[in-house]
């Protein structure tokens, strides 16, 4: 009771002055003060292992020293901070490095667009250019998709709670079953039948948009075979393929782009979150040149699309991709996490758990109402930041910084297991 009273007093300002829409400060009721690598500390000096990474924004960890030093040096030298899309050295250097380190080695040819510095805005720009290029207005998305909280992005999002918040009808989109949404059914054949049948009521869309691993939707990972079939379908019907790599990209699944193992070449790619290096707002939309030329100057813009501090950190972050070493390290840690997830599921059958995801974007789907929430709440009390996802918050979602070491994973998983034991013993 005393702890609860102290927590109430600590969070009083947020309760009294901040909007009711606040979310994370409710689930993790403390005041965070410091962070480094994969650890965070609150004002009481309590240490937390971070299995959340700013919802995937901190792939390179909290306060990477080199990024931090370069940003501080730029500020001290009175560098341009705000520039919209005027030419600056940080913008120039990022574009050159991104082409050199990311695009050219993967034989990808994209124009780099800077929309507003959020995930939802890169999605909005992708939908807009797809409609402009094709002259069609509808877009196909998938069950349990999450693409953002603005009207266009919400229209291709599956979650009913978030869609309801729009307050207006969300049109010009059609939701189709994601891979494995219907057990033992070929969802590609289902989708193609809708396109083939003139009586289906589904118009030929401008684009198909998808996440290769659905983050907010429950850590649902599409098979590579399914992704290849989607690309083939898009080519057959002259539909643009948009990959939303806002959360699954930037190395989260073990390769820079989450779609690389499938060998596909999307028409448009959306990146945000960790593209900014160490938590600074930034987003880019990658568009094939033949489609990008349809834009008129300023046709899609944003006041903060010229975040030079983010360009500096982002350029430094690209150094991780000069060789295969970083990706291989992520894959090794992903295998360790996957092995331990399987062990936990086997050890605690009461969870009725199933593994989800790939790379360092994994989860445990728990088929017991409310249990995932209870476990995550107990984990916070014990020093682990981990959240739930899925339409019913039924999945414990693991999203640690990619720079976490095995010791950090072991410690976090140990806290998780202790939390599971405690909750199951109630």
Image (tube, rainbow, N blue to C red):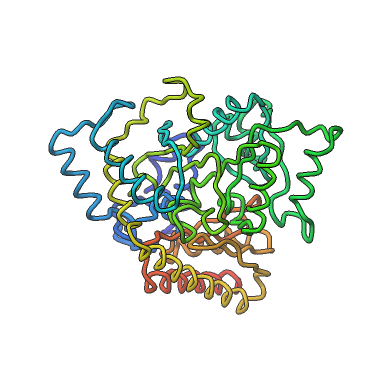
Residue 196 placement (x, y as % from top left): 81, 39
Residue 190: x percent and y percent? Answer: 79, 48
In this picture, residue 46 sits left or right of residue 257 = left
Q: In front here: 350 or 29?
A: 350
Q: Is residue 379 above or below residue 154?
A: below
Left or right: 108, with 182 as reference point:
left
Residue 245: where, in percent of width, then height? Answer: 51, 47
The answer to whether one can see residue 20 in this image is no
Residue at figure coordinates x 63%, y 62% from the top left: 365
Q: Is residue 331 visible?
A: yes
Please tell me which residue lies in front, 239 or 44: 239
Position above or below: 307 against 378: above
Q: Position of residue 141 (x, y in %)?
A: 66, 41
Q: In the figure, is residue 74 to the left or right of 376?
A: left
Instruction: Determine the image quadrant of residue 165.
Output: top right
Which residue is more in the foreground, 369 or 147? 147
Q: Is residue 247 above or below residue 205?
A: below
Q: Is residue 312 above or below residue 62?
A: above
The image quarter in which residue 320 lies: bottom left
Frontmost residue, 41 versus 187: 187
Name the quadrant of the C terminus.
Answer: bottom right
Residue at the (73%, 48%) spot, across then down: 177
Residue at the image position 37 percent from the left and 31 percent from the top: 305
68 sits left or right of 362 in the view: left
Determine the residue positioned at 39% across, 68% down: 329
């Amino acid at each position: 009771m005393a702890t609860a009273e102290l927590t109430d007093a600590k969070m009083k300002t947020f309760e009294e002055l901040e909007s009711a829409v606040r979310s994370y400060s409710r689930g993790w009721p403390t005041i965070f003060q410091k962070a480094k690598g994969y650890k965070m500390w609150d004002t009481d000096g309590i240490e937390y292992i971070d299995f959340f990474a700013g919802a995937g924004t901190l792939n390179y960890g909290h306060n990477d020293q080199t990024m931090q030093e370069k940003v501080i040096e730029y500020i001290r030298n009175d560098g341009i901070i705000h520039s919209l899309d005027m030419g600056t050295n940080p913008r120039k250097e990022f574009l050159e490095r991104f082409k050199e380190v990311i695009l050219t080695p993967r034989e990808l040819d994209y124009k780099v667009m800077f929309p507003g510095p959020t995930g939802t805005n890169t999605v909005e720009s992708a939908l807009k250019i797809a409609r402009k290029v094709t002259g069609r207005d509808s877009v196909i998305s998938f069950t349990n998709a999450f693409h953002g909280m603005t009207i266009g992005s919400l229209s291709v999002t599956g979650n009913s709670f978030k869609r309801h918040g729009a307050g207006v009808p969300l049109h010009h989109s059609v939701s189709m079953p994601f891979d494995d949404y219907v057990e033992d059914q070929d969802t590609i054949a289902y989708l193609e039948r809708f396109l083939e049948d003139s009586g289906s009521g589904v118009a030929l869309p401008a684009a198909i948009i998808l996440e290769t691993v659905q983050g907010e939707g429950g850590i649902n990972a599409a098979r590579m075979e399914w992704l290849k079939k989607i690309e083939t379908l898009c080519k057959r019907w002259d539909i643009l393929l948009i990959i939303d790599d806002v959360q699954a990209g930037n190395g989260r699944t073990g390769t820079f782009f989450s779609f690389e193992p499938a060998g596909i070449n999307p028409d448009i790619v959306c990146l945000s979150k960790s593209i900014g290096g160490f938590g600074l707002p930034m987003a880019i939309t990658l568009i094939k040149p033949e489609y990008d030329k349809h834009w008129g100057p300023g046709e899609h813009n944003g006041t903060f699309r010229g975040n030079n501090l983010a360009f500096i950190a982002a350029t430094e972050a690209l150094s991780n991709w000069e060789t295969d070493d970083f990706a291989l390290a992520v894959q090794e840690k992903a295998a360790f996490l996957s092995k331990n997830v399987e062990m936990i599921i086997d050890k605690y059958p009461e969870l009725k758990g199933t593994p989800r995801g790939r790379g360092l974007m994994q989860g445990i789907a728990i088929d017991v109402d409310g249990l995932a929430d209870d476990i995550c709440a107990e984990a916070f009390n014990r020093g682990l930041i981990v959240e739930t996802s899925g339409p019913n918050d039924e999945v414990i979602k693991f999203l640690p910084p990619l720079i976490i070491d095995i010791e950090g994973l072991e410690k976090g998983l140990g806290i998780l297991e202790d939390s599971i034991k405690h909750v199951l013993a109630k």
